């Protein structure tokens, strides 16, 4: 049997698939109870595949109703920039 | 410990190179000015000193979506100078602002009704009349917002670019590009819209956009799939159909899970001549001839040794880092950043490249930078750095080259380095 030389990229891909077998698949195993179920599963899946057009990193809705404690603090920069010396 | 707000997010020289602006995550802009000719000694060029600093953007909150709008300055672009004042556009994710930076070196003195400290005099004590005169004062540099261009972007603004007509500019977010007039803030024209009817079908986003340096009807935008589209605004009002599509064919047998991610273009820059454009993807810099769409004319590997580290780089999110690139004034050399505070330069004529490091620990001030070398595998030579000891938190994403001289600005996470080539 011939031993094919794998490109470094393909070797890295194999490593990744070994660590994350469900990468790239639709969340929840492709069967959902309803649209709410689907959306909850999507919100849980770490979506790295596409640079998201919506800022999902700062989203505090989807899993729960946000409370004032959840919302990030607004911190206007009163301190001068370090570069300004 | 790095203060989050000090992280530099953009660096840009103005058209003469006399001013250098930086923007940071805290929404602040710091402008440096080069020392003028008559002050410097013959063996060096003028140094850059702080000229002005101001708060450009504040954090905001979108109550409808329960989302914070970051004050981070994504891009700064200078307008060409028309009068004594300087103007620049700065943008965060949602709002673009036109700032006027002006100098004040005189002030009126000798008011009739006010004391010199501003307190009003008792009118009954005023018995004579005099004309106030302007007297010199210590230079004061003031920045004031002249226009606020808001509410035109649903998604995050990644680019702004001033047209060669010096009257209009474009702003681009993930899915749309808008055309503005610098004088008009209450409306803009949408010129590109790639939002699919069903967001589930979204596969590609806009990553950067720029106007052609000479043709005011032409602009390009790059995508997360490694393509660049050139559009001509004379063809139609909505430029959804490109005039040219630049894409390098890929060998399908080499395709992997990472292929699309590393082909995503993080920056696109026209050459000063307008004949070429340069794109930066995760591992390389490519130069395209605008007359040839099917492949780049030059490709330079920035850090090919990372190809066998893509799995870890995906896990720590570094594979999504957006590096910028820039041309020197004569379009003969291109520069881009890498990890470990390294940055790379490629000479297009000699085909030589060099890796340098922006770090205070490893370089004494006023000494020539020592070239660095990364050892990909096998035996590491003395002075080489092995791939596994690279610090991936030390990324150089933003670099800029003076438009006329060999002076470069390199931003590490929270420090700005200015290097120049040896004079004499």
Image (spheres, rainbow, N blue to C red):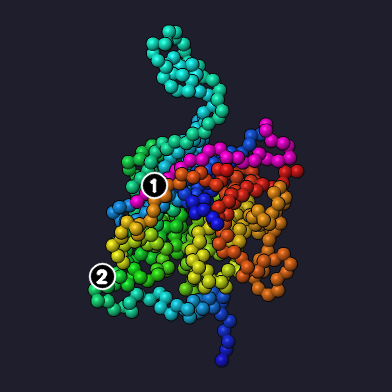
| Spatial separation of the CA atoms under disc 2 and disc 1 | 33 Å
- Which numbered mark, 2 or 1, is in the foreground of this view? 2
Query: Given the current orientation, which residue lies at the most extreme right position?
Result: B424
Name the residue beneath numbered marker 1.
B95
Name the residue beneath numbered marker 2.
A36
**Relative to B228, residue B35 above or below:** above
Q: Is residue B156 left or right of residue B295?
A: left
Coordinates of residue A18 in the picture (x, y in percent): 48, 80
Q: Nearer the viewer, residue B235 or B313?
A: B313
Coordinates of residue B32 in the picture (x, y in percent): 57, 41
Mark 2 is surrounded, within 10 Å at the Cα level, by few (under 14), some (14 to 19) or many (20 or more) other residues, namely: few
| Chain letter of disc 2 in the image | A
Range covered by the magenta-colored residues:
B38-61
Q: Nearer the viewer, residue B169 or B75?
A: B75
Same subunit, tags 2 and 1: no
Where on the picture, by quarter, is residue B17?
Answer: top right
Q: Nearer the viewer, residue B131 or B148?
A: B131
Coordinates of residue B228 in the picture (x, y in percent): 46, 58
Q: Is residue B338 left or right of residue B165?
A: right
Query: Given the current orientation, which residue lies at the most extreme top position?
Result: B127
Residue found at x 24% / y 76%: A33
**Relative to A34, residue B351 above or below:** above
**Relative to B56, residue A72 above or below:** below
Coordinates of residue B340 in the picture (x, y in percent): 61, 61
Q: Is residue B214 visible?
A: no
Q: Secondary structure at mark 2?
A: helix
Residue found at x 70% / y 66%: B384
Residue found at x 49% / y 34%: B142
């Amino acid at each position: 049997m011939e031993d094919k030389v794998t490109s470094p990229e393909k070797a890295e891909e194999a490593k990744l698939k070994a660590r994350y077998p469900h990468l790239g698949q639709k969340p929840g195993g492709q069967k959902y109870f309803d649209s709410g179920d689907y959306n909850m599963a999507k919100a849980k899946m770490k979506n790295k595949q596409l640079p998201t057009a919506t800022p999902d990193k700062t989203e505090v809705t989807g899993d729960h109703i946000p409370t004032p404690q959840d919302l990030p603090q607004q911190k206007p920069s009163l301190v001068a920039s370090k570069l300004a010396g | 410990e790095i203060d989050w707000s000090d992280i530099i997010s953009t660096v840009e020289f103005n058209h003469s190179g006399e001013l250098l602006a930086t923007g940071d995550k805290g929404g602040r802009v710091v402008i440096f000015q080069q020392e003028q000719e008559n002050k410097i000694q013959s063996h060096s060029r003028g140094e850059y000193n702080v000229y002005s600093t101001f708060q450009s953007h504040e954090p905001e909150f979108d109550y409808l979506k329960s989302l914070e709008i970051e004050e981070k300055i994504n891009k700064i672009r200078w307008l060409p100078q028309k009068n004594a004042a300087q103007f620049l556009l700065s943008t965060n994710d949602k709002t673009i602002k036109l700032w006027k930076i002006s100098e004040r070196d005189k002030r009126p003195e000798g008011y009739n009704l006010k004391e010199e400290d501003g307190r009003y005099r008792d009118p009954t004590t005023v018995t004579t009349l005099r004309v106030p005169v302007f007297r010199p004062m210590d230079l004061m540099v003031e920045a004031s917002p002249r226009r606020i261009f808001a509410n035109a972007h649903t998604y995050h603004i990644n680019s702004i670019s001033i047209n060669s007509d010096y009257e209009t500019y474009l702003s681009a977010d993930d899915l749309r590009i808008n055309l503005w007039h610098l004088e008009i803030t209450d409306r803009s024209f949408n010129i590109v819209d790639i939002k699919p009817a069903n967001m589930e079908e979204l596969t590609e986003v806009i990553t950067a956009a720029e106007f052609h340096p000479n043709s005011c009807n032409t602009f390009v935008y790059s995508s997360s799939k490694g393509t660049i589209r050139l559009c001509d605004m004379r063809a139609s009002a909505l430029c959804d159909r490109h005039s040219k599509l630049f894409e390098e064919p890929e060998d399908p047998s080499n395709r992997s899970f990472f292929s699309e991610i590393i082909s995503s273009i993080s920056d696109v820059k026209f050459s000063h001549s307008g004949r070429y454009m340069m794109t930066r993807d995760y591992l390389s810099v490519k130069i395209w001839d605008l007359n040839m769409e099917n492949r780049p004319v030059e490709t330079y590997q920035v850090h090919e040794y990372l190809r066998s580290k893509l799995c870890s780089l995906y896990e720590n999110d570094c594979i999504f880092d957006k590096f910028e690139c820039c041309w020197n004034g004569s379009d003969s050399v291109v520069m881009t950043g890498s990890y470990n505070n390294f940055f790379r330069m490629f000479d297009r004529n000699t085909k030589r490249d060099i890796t340098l490091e922006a770090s205070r620990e490893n370089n004494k001030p006023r000494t020539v930078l020592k070239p660095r070398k990364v050892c990909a595998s096998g035996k590491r030579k003395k002075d080489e750095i092995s791939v596994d000891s690279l610090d991936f938190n030390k990324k150089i994403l933003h670099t800029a080259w003076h438009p006329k001289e060999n002076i470069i600005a390199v931003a590490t996470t929270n420090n700005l380095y200015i290097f120049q080539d040896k004079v004499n």
